[in-house]
Image (cartoon, rainbow, N blue to C red):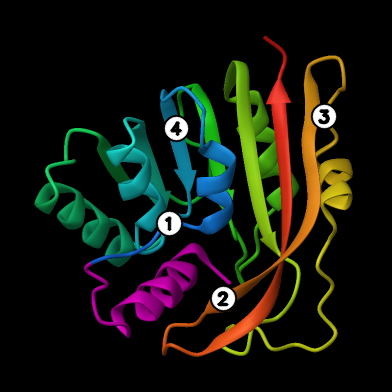
């Protein structure tokens, strides 16, 4: 799938949905960030913008990237409407081509799954290298297939948090695994349906 095809795919995904005027943050993000001192955060794959808006409201300076221009424009509009425009920088960016510049106190990769070719371990390795000393990389992945997921392949393998960590291949002298957990929760889909889902949570911290 070419970059143009990937952009078109994700633009179509978001354009097919009505604008969510009140997107909610991911539960695992809220749990992981609670108690942290706000700083600079990079949000990889902002989607509808719930994470970025919540982080900004909590005092974080947010850079949000997504391959979809539709998603980015919606997030920017919502941020301005909430008076958070100065705290949210929403940018269209293709992670398959390059990693965003800058260094961060927190980098969040919430369900960074895509049907397009993407070297995820390389992206996440770049994210770890973009952490400031003491910064954290929070990776939350699907551990099960929800009924509303775009990928219903019954043979799909969801790597465990430790498998993700092994694939990133970070040196333990510089990066420490703070959390590697498999958690269950009741989730709500886009049409209001509910189902139990599994989350794979990995938190990596750079030495201070």
Disc nearer the start of the sequence (2/3): 3
Looking at the image, how many numbered discs can be counted on the residues? 4
Going from N to C along the chain, the mark reached first, 1 or 2, is 1
Left or right: residue 84 versus residue 202 is left
Rendered image: mark on residue 170: 3
Determine the secondary structure under disc 2: strand
Q: Position of residue 161 (x, y in %)?
A: 82, 51
Tell me residue 35's x, y (percent).
51, 30
Is disc 3 placed on a helix, strand or loop? loop
Residue 4: mark: none
> Who comes first in sequence, dot 1 or dot 3?
1
At horizontal 23% and vertical 62% (from top left) the residue drawn is 74
Mark 4 surroundings: few (<14), some (14-19) or many (≥20) residues within 10 A: many
How far across and how far down the image is residue 200, in percent?
74, 58
- Residue 115 position (above or below residue 190): above
Check disc 4 and report the residue beneath it.
41
Identify the magenta region.
Answer: 1-21
Q: Do the residues labelled 1 and 3 touch (CB within 8 Å)?
A: no
* Residue 177 part of the magenta segment: no
For mark 1, give the secondary structure: loop
Instruction: Tell me how far mark 4 sits from mark 3, CA to CA.
Output: 20 Å
Residue 26 seen from this side = yes
Q: Do the residues labelled 2 and 4 touch (CB within 8 Å)?
A: no
């Amino acid at each position: 799938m070419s970059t143009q095809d990937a952009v078109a795919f994700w633009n179509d995904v978001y354009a097919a949905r009505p604008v969510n005027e009140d997107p909610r943050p991911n539960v695992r993000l809220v749990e992981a960030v609670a108690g942290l001192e706000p700083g600079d955060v990079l949000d990889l794959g902002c989607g509808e913008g719930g994470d970025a808006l919540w982080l900004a409201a909590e005092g974080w300076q947010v850079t949000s990237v997504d391959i979809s221009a539709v998603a980015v424009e919606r997030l920017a509009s919502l941020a301005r409407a909430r008076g958070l425009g100065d705290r949210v920088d929403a940018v269209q960016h293709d992670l398959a081509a390059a990693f965003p510049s800058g260094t961060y106190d927190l980098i969040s990769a919430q369900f960074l799954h895509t049907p397009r070719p993407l070297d995820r371990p390389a992206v996440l390795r770049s994210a770890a290298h973009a952490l400031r000393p003491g910064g954290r990389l929070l990776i939350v992945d699907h551990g099960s297939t929800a009924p509303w997921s775009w990928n219903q392949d019954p043979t799909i393998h969801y790597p465990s948090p430790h498998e993700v960590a092994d694939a990133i291949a970070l040196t333990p002298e510089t990066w420490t695994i703070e959390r590697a957990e498999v958690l269950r929760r009741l989730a709500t889909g886009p049409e209001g349906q509910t189902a139990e889902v599994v989350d794979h949570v990995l938190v990596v911290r750079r030495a201070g």
